[in-house]
Image (cartoon, helix red, strand yellow):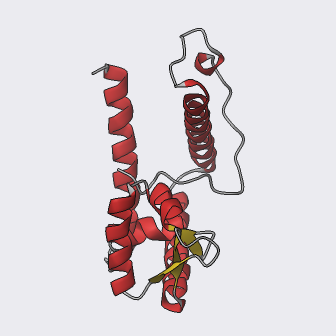
Amino acid sequence: MDEKILVYLALLRDFGRIYTQKILNGGSTGRKIDLKLSQVKAMYAFRDADSRSANEFADLVGTKLCTATVMVDSLEREGLVTRKRDHADRRKVMVTLTPRGKRFRKDFLAHRHRIARKIFAHIGSAEQLRLQKSLATVCEILQQAFAEEQEGGGRQKKGSPRHAEKPAAKSRKTEPKSVAAKG
């Protein structure tokens, strides 16, 4: 396999592992909290909506529908979600946070923000800006690559605009679609 691809995959895996372990281990408090990886992924999927179709949920957690179904089964047993057929389209299954799931999401997002604040407390302002710009650039490049792949089957020649040098993207106030839970 191409060395560049191996390095890229290793970096993605390492980023996801470091970030997710930090969340699962309770940040720098040293106090491990009782979160499962499936719960972390689910909370990312529900970060801005109380309900998702099963297909949307699978896409957002980065799994196939059959794997997402197993995740939803577990979340349903824990009382975090319910699953019902959509009244408008009986083929569609909707996964919805329960009141307990909404509290769990609220606590999870607050926990994630505490960890981010602790991380940023140990990084100088220049490094904070550099990190934000780097992550924004990564998101921009990946979104462009995925869009090009969907438009024309994917392969771009070295002289294509995608391979041109780009300035770092400006920091955004809203979060890009997360890939952090993957790894």
Residue 118 visible (yes or no): no
**Along the line of sight, which residue is nearer the eye, 39 or 20?**
39
Residue 43 in view (yes/no): yes
Query: Relative to 155, is 58 above or below?
Result: below
Residue 10 image-quadrant placement: top left
> Residue at the spot x=33%, y=61% of the render?
67
Q: Identify the residue shown where x is 62% and y is 52%.
A: 176
Q: Position of residue 165 (x, y in %)?
A: 63, 19
In the image, residue 149 lies at what x, y percent? 54, 29
In-image side of 84 versus 66 (left or right): right
What residue is at 60 percent from the left and 70 percent from the top? 89
* Quadrant hosting residue 88: bottom right
Which is more toward the observer, 182 or 94? 94
**Horizontal and vertical percent position of residue 166:** 66, 24
Quadrant position of residue 174? bottom right
The residue furthest top is: 159
